[in-house]
Amino acid sequence: MGWGQRGVALILVLWLVTLLSVVASAFALSVRRESVLLRTARDRSEAQALVDGALQYAWLRLRASESVGRWLSNAAVYEVVYGAGRVRLELRDEAGKVNLNLVKEPMLNAFFTAAGLSSSEAAKLTDAVADWRDSDELRRLNGAEAEDYRLAGREFGPRNRPFEAVEELRAVLGMSPELYQRVAPWLTVYSGQAGIDPRSAPPELLLALPGVDAGMLDALAEGKQDAGGLLANASGITFAKGNNAAVAMRAEARLENGSATAVQAVLGRAGVGRPAYLFWREKMSSTEHETSLFERQALETVRLDGAPL
């Protein structure tokens, strides 16, 4: 073999070595990526399992006897520890919110007025909500049926059925994005009752009601004023006692490796001692408007693996 042929062979060998090196590097990078994805999926599954266990445990504690230590559903925060993982939970009875499907129209009108609408605007939106959730196509005085939605350029509405989710309120004629963001935290479709329980209601909702001030809320919290007396000052608002039939649970989990997850869920009764998930949404972190539950004081910390705290 001449020197020219040897040179060509050497170049071919070098190109082959280079190609094999590129293939090996790509394979190694792919393996590393797969490892990261698998580790992320494992951490996520572990965090979700930890949260699910904590939510189920919280449901049991909500129904425990006083001697065992019943947990409270008035926005109280609790902590559950298992292994190297920690979960903080905020519990709130859905009875403290306004039920979109069961609330009577005078109370709904008062609610929208409390949210900042004028009396005429509140009347229109109240009738539009009522027309959306009822089964007929008869338009109320200030309401909206299918023809009104078509004239407004809407391709859909109303459903003429009960609301399946609070988010559905966005589609009701007359509901603005700004108003929805303001009232959505005060609404529910899960409570199963027409009135609100002021002991589990968000303070922002109570303070928005006519005739209610911060002093009344302090008196209620200290037991100096009963709930009925509080709502007697709020014209048009119906009082009801909460029963934990459906409980909103906000949960944040942190693992030893730094992984974290946040979940919003609503649990309701499905049988004796057994809850059903009525709503579940996973979030990667708390929103900018929320304070992390790990920055708040927990009323109680429970370790479920038997190890000392």
Image: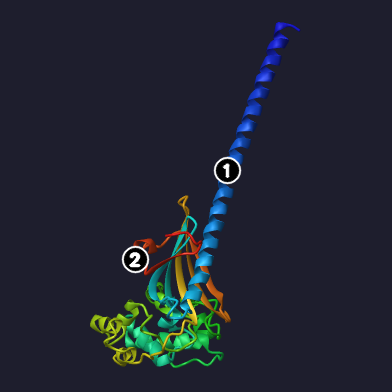
Label 2 secondary element:
loop
The part of the image, by quadrant, that contains residue 109 is bottom left
Between 99 and 249, which is closer to the camera in this rendering? 249
- Point out residue 106 in the picture as x, y percentages from the top left corner: 39, 92
Q: Residue at x 58, y 44 (%)?
A: 35
- Point out residue 75 in the picture as x, y percentages from the top left corner: 38, 74
Q: Is residue 304 visible?
A: yes
The part of the image, by quadrant, that contains residue 7 is top right
The part of the image, by quadrant, that contains residue 218 is bottom left
Local packing at callout 2 (Cα closer than 10 Å; few below 14, some 14-19, many 20+) is few
Q: Is residue 139 above or below residue 21?
A: below
Mark identifier at residue 297: 2
The residues bearing labels 1 and 2 have C-alpha atoms spaced at a distance of 39 Å
Q: Is residue 179 left or right of residue 62?
A: left
Label 1 secondary element:
helix
Q: Is residue 72 above or below residue 305?
A: below
Q: How many marks?
A: 2
In which quadrant is the N terminus drawn? top right
Q: Is residue 239 left or right of residue 152?
A: left
Q: Is residue 108 above or below residue 279?
A: below
The amino acid marked with disc number 1 is Arg
Between 268 and 207, which is closer to the camera in this rendering? 268
Q: Is residue 143 visible?
A: no
Frontmost of labels 1 and 2 is 2
Q: Is residue 105 left or right of residue 135?
A: left
Q: Residue at x 51, y 77 (%)?
A: 165
Q: Residue at x 50, y 75 (%)?
A: 59
Mark identifier at residue 64: none
Q: Which residue is mark 1?
A: 33
In which quadrant is the C terminus drawn? bottom left
